[in-house]
């Protein structure tokens, strides 16, 4: 019992440190990717290739004046960034980072905790992150901050609907809310993205909106709202908000990878596992196979993070009315159709065929019909 | 009326249904940024990497020696007269017996000073010099000063080092014209 506690503790600590470390290096890679996309080379002065840049940034933030406006609600002003960071870090607890590790005769899953409502946990905690922004924006006693906070809240609420509907389609196929169960059912290359590509695209767009990333970074809009809910924040409080955002990006990439891209599963994993067990014995082989799966999972996560950044440095920001239109008039209905099609596909017994036929048929009918109609009557 | 026909007419027609999902535009844009992501970067990382500025760039001054290592300068003062910023000053001295290996002619500059804060790097001293003694190097800058005592450069900083002689592709305007023709041929 105690050894289980110890191992769990170590795993939780490692996941915690990893989330923070990856978030720190996301800031570096964001700048490098931005630079490369704009034909520059990016930060390269701090350490070889600038890899110490995040440390320098953090050091700078720590030494800046920790400022609280006079008329601000002091306690809420301090709690705001804390809640944002807390919520961001909490959601990594249920992500299945890998299969089981064999220690002695114990099988320990590489996961903070395996609750049977994993998906709900993520959504509950992520929704709490909105409180961080809302409280921070309100407590600043500044109209720009309040605007940013309200925008953040309404955007998060609007996109959570489409997000939830896409998620329902996944749960419908899996029949379980546990993220580990969802991951296990996508064994090999039996990934959900092949069954519901439209659901994945919708989920991806919603994840962008939930992370407040461009093109949905309206809560921050440097040009119109200064930086929205972060306007009055400085020093490490602002750093915590920024950090929470990057942690969120990591977590949402991890969730997308585990919901749609098969988490730690990769084609040929059974063969690799058998081979390693044959070569290295039961325990070592199993553990190495598991770690390989974890590495594959992180590769998928990094791919998503890269795509997030790639999108950020490509697309301009939406207007607020465009954002709402996209969310409510385009994504929510499409997510509903996706849900219905997936329901039919699951019942039909041939999920792959029916899902593609159904979704393809719908898109063809809708967009074909709409454009025919518009050509005729305009 | 158009001056050139390079400008593209903006398409202001209504978006079609597919275009209204923004997806075709998004993918087109992402293809462009990905292309730039992999394109070679034109950045020159300055302190480590330096651009070649050409054979006639005017940088750090140098007092040339001749092939036998004797100073060419005879302290005639023409450079000081030509200098529009009055940055050059010198003290002449007469060569004594036994110094023939140091100075080419009977008269030499006992001290030769250039005030680098006054110098505008116009190169008129180089053009004025009848003995081909003073030149502005094309491959070396005058570094940043951190102290006002570092501003005036004496002979110790200006006279050519025989172990590391200064050379360039074109010494005169005629050389340069020839080089230019060769490069453009």
Image (tube, coloured by chain):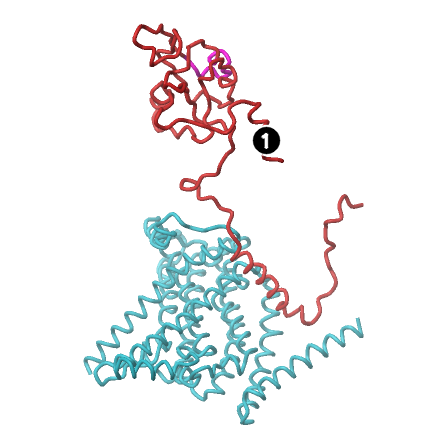
Chain colours: A cyan, B red
Image x and y of residue B18, in percent = 67, 71
Q: Please provide the residue range marked out in magenta.
A: B79-89
**Rendered location of residue A124, percent (x, y):** 42, 76
The number of callouts visible is 1
In the image, taking residue A70 as reference, residue A218 lies left or right, namely right
Which residue does the image show at 52% across and 68% down from the upper left? Answer: A155
Q: Quadrant of residue A248?
A: bottom left
Residue located at (43% from left, 87% from top): A176
Q: Residue at x 45, y 79 (%)?
A: A259
Mark 1, residue position: B180
Residue A65 image position (x, y, % from top left)? 35, 48
Vertical relation: A269 (above or below) A20: below
Instruction: From this view, report whether residue B148 is shown above or below residue A5.
Output: above
User: Is residue B135 positioned above or below A148 on the image?
Assistant: above
Is B81 covered by the magenta stretch? yes
Which image quarter: residue B29? bottom right
Q: In which image quadrant can residue A294 be found?
A: bottom left
* Nearer to me, B57 or B181: B181
Compare residues A275 and B19 and report the one nearer the observer: A275
Residue A135 x, y percent position in the rendering: 42, 64
Query: B114 and A237: which one is in front?
Result: B114
- B133 part of magenta stretch: no
Q: Quadrant of the N terminus of chain A?
A: bottom left
| Kind of element beneath mark 1 | helix
Q: Residue furthest front?
A: B68
Q: Please rate how many residues cluster around mark 1, counting C-alpha atoms within 10 Å: few if below 14, some from 14 to 19, many from 20.
A: few
Read off the chain for label 1: B
């Amino acid at each position: 019992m105690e050894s289980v506690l110890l191992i769990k503790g170590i795993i939780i600590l490692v996941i915690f440190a990893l989330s923070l470390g990856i978030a720190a290096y996301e800031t570096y890679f964001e700048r490098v990717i931005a630079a490369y996309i704009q034909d520059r080379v990016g930060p390269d002065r701090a350490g070889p290739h600038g890899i110490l840049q995040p440390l320098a940034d953090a050091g700078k933030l720590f030494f800046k004046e920790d400022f609280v406006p006079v008329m601000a609600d002091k306690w809420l002003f301090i709690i705001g960034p804390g809640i944002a960071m807390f919520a961001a870090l909490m959601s990594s607890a249920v992500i299945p980072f890998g299969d089981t590790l064999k220690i002695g005769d114990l099988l320990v899953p590489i996961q903070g905790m395996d609750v049977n409502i994993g998906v709900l946990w993520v959504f509950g905690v992520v929704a709490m992150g909105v409180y961080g922004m809302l409280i921070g924006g309100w407590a600043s006693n500044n109209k720009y901050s309040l605007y940013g906070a309200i925008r953040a809240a309404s955007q998060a609420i609007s996109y959570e609907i489409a997000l939830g509907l896409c998620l329902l389609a996944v749960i419908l196929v899996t029949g379980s809310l546990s993220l580990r169960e969802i991951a296990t059912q996508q064994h090999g290359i039996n990934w959900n993205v092949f069954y519901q590509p439209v659901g994945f695209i919708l989920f991806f767009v919603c994840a962008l909106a939930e992370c407040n990333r461009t093109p949905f970074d309206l809560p921050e809009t440097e040009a119109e709202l200064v930086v929205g809910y972060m306007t009055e924040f400085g020093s490490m409080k602002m750093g915590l908000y920024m950090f929470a955002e990057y942690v969120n990006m990591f977590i949402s990439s991890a969730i997308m990878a585990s919901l749609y891209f098969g988490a730690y599963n990769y084609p040929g994993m059974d063969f690799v596992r058998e081979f390693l067990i044959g070569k290295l014995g039961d325990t070592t082989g199993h553990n190495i196979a598991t770690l390989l799966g974890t590495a594959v999972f992180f590769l998928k996560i990094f791919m998503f993070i890269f795509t997030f950044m790639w999108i950020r440095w490509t697309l301009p920001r939406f207007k607020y009315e465009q954002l709402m239109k996209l969310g409510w008039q385009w994504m929510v209905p499409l997510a509903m159709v996706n849900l219905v099609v997936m329901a039919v596909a699951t019942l039909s017994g041939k999920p792959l065929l029916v899902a593609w036929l159904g979704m393809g048929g719908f898109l063809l009918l809708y967009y074909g019909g709409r454009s025919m109609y518009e050509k005729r009557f305009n | 009326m158009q001056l050139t026909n390079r400008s593209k007419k903006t398409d202001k027609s209504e978006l079609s249904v597919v275009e209204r999902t923004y997806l075709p535009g998004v993918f087109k844009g992402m293809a462009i940024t990905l292309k730039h992501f992999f394109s070679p970067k034109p950045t020159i990382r300055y302190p480590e990497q330096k651009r070649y500025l050409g054979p006639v760039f005017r940088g750090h001054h140098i007092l040339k020696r001749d092939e036998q290592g004797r100073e060419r300068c005879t302290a005639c003062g023409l450079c000081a007269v030509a200098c529009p910023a009055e940055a050059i000053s010198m003290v002449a001295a007469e060569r004594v017996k036994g110094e023939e290996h140091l100075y080419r002619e009977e008269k030499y500059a006992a001290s030769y000073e250039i005030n680098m804060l006054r110098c505008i790097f116009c190169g008129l001293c180089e053009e004025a010099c009848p003995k081909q003694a003073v030149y502005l190097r094309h491959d070396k800058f005058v570094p940043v000063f951190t102290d006002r005592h570092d501003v005036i450069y004496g002979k110790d900083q200006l006279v050519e080092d025989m172990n590391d002689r200064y050379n360039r592709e074109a010494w005169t305007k005629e050389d340069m014209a020839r080089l230019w023709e060769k490069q453009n041929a």
